[in-house]
Amino acid sequence: MSDGVVRYRVVVTGRVQGVWYRESCRRTADALGVNGWVRNRADGSVEAAVEGPPSAVDRLLDWMREGPPRAVVVRVDPRPEDPAGDRDFTVR
């Protein structure tokens, strides 16, 4: 943790590809002031790095457990990392 900023690497499994998960995640992160990135993985999961104030990151993690309407989230696995200083949130 640095200057009140936390960062997690998150893997989300379930029906999370082809359901607008990444773009919805970006929009939610932007609205919450969370930085980082999100991408699809070859195994059908979604991976993200999320960084920001703890309360905002917690709210994004809560959203990730639900996802957009067509998603079926089975598991969200957040693992802490050192902050990297990301300045925006991108879809990779």
Image (cartoon, rainbow, N blue to C red):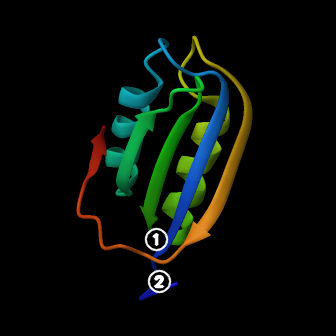
Q: Residues within 10 Å of mark 2 (few under 14, many from 20)?
A: few
Q: Is residue 27 above or below residue 43?
A: below
Residue at mark 2: 4
Q: Position of 34 compared to 75: left or right?
A: left
Q: Single out the residue that lies furthest toward the left.
A: 87
What kind of element bears circle 2? loop
Residue 43's image quarter? top right
Q: Position of residue 55 (x, y in %)?
A: 55, 65
Residue visible at 53% across and 48% down in the picture? 60
Q: Position of residue 57 (x, y in %)?
A: 52, 59
Residue visible at 58% across and 39% down in the picture? 63
Q: Single out the residue that lies furthest toward the bottom.
A: 3
Q: Is the C terminus in the top left, top right, bottom left or bottom right quadrant? A: top left
Q: Position of 60 compared to 87: left or right?
A: right
The earlier-in-sequence mark between 1 and 2 is 2
Residue visible at 45% across and 87% down in the picture? 2
Residue visible at 46% across and 55% down in the picture? 49
**Amino acid type assigned to the residue bearing label 1 in the image:** Pro
Question: What is the spatial separation of the Cα atoms under label 1 and label 2, in whole angstroms?
Answer: 6 Å
Q: Position of residue 25 (x, y in %)?
A: 43, 36
Q: Single out the residue that lies furthest toward the right.
A: 74
Q: Residues within 10 Å of mark 1 (few under 14, many from 20)?
A: some
Residue at mark 1: 53
What kind of element bears circle 1? loop
Please say if the residues under marks 1 and 2 sit with CB atoms less than 8 Å apart: yes
Q: Position of 73 compared to 8: left or right?
A: right
Q: Position of 8 compared to 3: left or right?
A: right
Label annotation for residue 33? none
Q: Position of residue 72 (x, y in %)?
A: 68, 18
